[in-house]
Image (spheres, grey):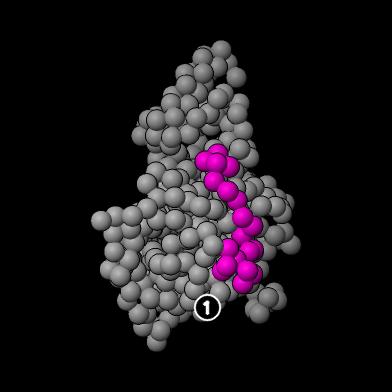
Amino acid sequence: MQYREVVAANDVEVRIQRIFRERLNVEVPSPDTELLSTGRLDSLAFVDLVFHLEAEFGITVALDELDLPQVQTISAIARYVVHRQAGGKAATE
Amino acid sequence: MSSTMRVALVAEEAAGVEALRAMARTPHQIVAVLTRLGGVGPLPVARAARGLSIPLWPAEDVRDPALGTKLSDSGIDLLLNVHSLYLATEAVLRAPRVGCFNLHPGPLPEYAGLNTVSWAILQGEREYGVTVHRMEPRVDSGAIAYQERFEVDCAGETALSLMHKCVRAGVPLLVRLLEQAAVDPAAIPAVAQDLSRRRYYGRGVPHHGRLDWRRSAGEICNFIRASDYGPFPSPWGRPSATVGAREVHVLSASSTAEQAGVAPGTVGPTTASGILVAAGDEWVVVRRVMADGVAHDASDILKPGDHFDLEHEGRAVS
């Protein structure tokens, strides 16, 4: 990942952490906290998260492009968001 | 005058967590949560209950008549079941003072049983719903207390998104039930189901989980969306078909409304969003597939000119 992308990802991580805290009412201690095995992200919260990611970052999230490793941590979600913001392919486009 | 209800919650899955959190925000007391406490996979309800310091009892206790006595001794007013599949004994069903109620993710009596959100999408329903009903020994057959119906997005709805709608609409119905029970239990609605309209769905997976490309594009895409729980495991798995002796599971696809004009199962040209495969009537654009356990863009696996096998009764037609 390039330096500029690292900076962008860090900013995105902060904003995603805020979505978890303020929209999903879930406290995530760190961007590397495991979301699935700790019960912080389940299938219902996942659908809400996708809605909020689209609104917050102005992206279209391709549900069928997301695999579990991409939603394991806030860091992983941020990498996906940065990829999409940079024009990375979404399968549904 | 309102009283505080004493509740036993039998719950599983994300819906169970959602219901637990919603009830914990009410003035009513969750005396115990009955949920799976071991076995394979995560235990989301047990984790959430521990976080709220609510006692945990094993979910399978609902099959034990002794639980009826325990519920009575604990002064339980209501037993609420959310997405737990254990069948309660009659002694348990009779024990709570007000009664036992189930949140069913489907409109009753039309969609009783298992995986009903998937069946509704498969069958192209335009409307669906969620039901809170009294529990009877016969599954999903008791009198309806509350029901809410909503639209199904015919082109884009997946099993995951429809289940999400059910829980978002259903949990407030449980809270409403609690509030009514606290004020006047006799005023809880009890509308008998018209069991002549009942349809019960079991565990079976339609078409043995196989895609038959001779079906219409609409039927094929419905089947794929009906099996789509996003990145989470699907109870139906993902529909599969064989191409060049390779098993391919189709994760996402949509219809094009363009006549195919070639044999069903023929792989056509790539497009901006995927690769075309001929259904019985129109082209289907396939976006994502899984092969050898790994998800791919469909165009990485399928090539123009490939042919999916056409099967009959589980056997390839030569």
Badge 1: residue crowd in 10 Å (few <14, some 14–19, many ≥20): few
The subunit carrying tag 1 is: B
In x, y percent, where is residue A1?
60, 19
Q: Please determine whether, in this image, residue B142 is positioned above or below residue B273.
A: below
In x, y percent, where is residue A30?
57, 23
Q: Residue furthest front?
A: B73
Q: Residue furthest bottom?
A: B196
Image point (42%, 42%), residue name? A48
Is residue B58 toward the left or the right of residue B185 in the image? right
Q: Quadrant of residue B244?
A: bottom right
Q: Please determine whether, in this image, residue B308 is positioned above or below residue A43.
A: below
Callout 1, which amino acid?
A: Pro
Image point (47%, 61%), residue name? B76
In x, y percent, where is residue B62?
59, 66
Per the rendered image, the range of residues in magenta is: B50-70
Residue marked by disc 1: B137
Q: Quadrant of residue B3?
A: bottom left
Residue B230 visible, this angle: no
In front here: B195 or B56?
A: B56
In front here: B305 or B116?
A: B116
Whether B297 is among the magenta residues is no
Q: Please determine whether, in this image, residue B182 is positioned above or below residue A20.
A: below
In front here: A32 or B182?
A: B182
Quadrant housing the N terminus of chain B: bottom left
Residue A13 visible, this angle: yes
Is residue A28 toward the left or the right of residue A15 in the image? right
Q: Secondary structure at mark 1?
A: loop
Quadrant housing the C terminus of chain B: bottom right
Image point (33%, 74%), residue name? B190
In x, y percent, where is residue B45?
56, 49
Is residue B58 toward the left or the right of residue B104 in the image? right
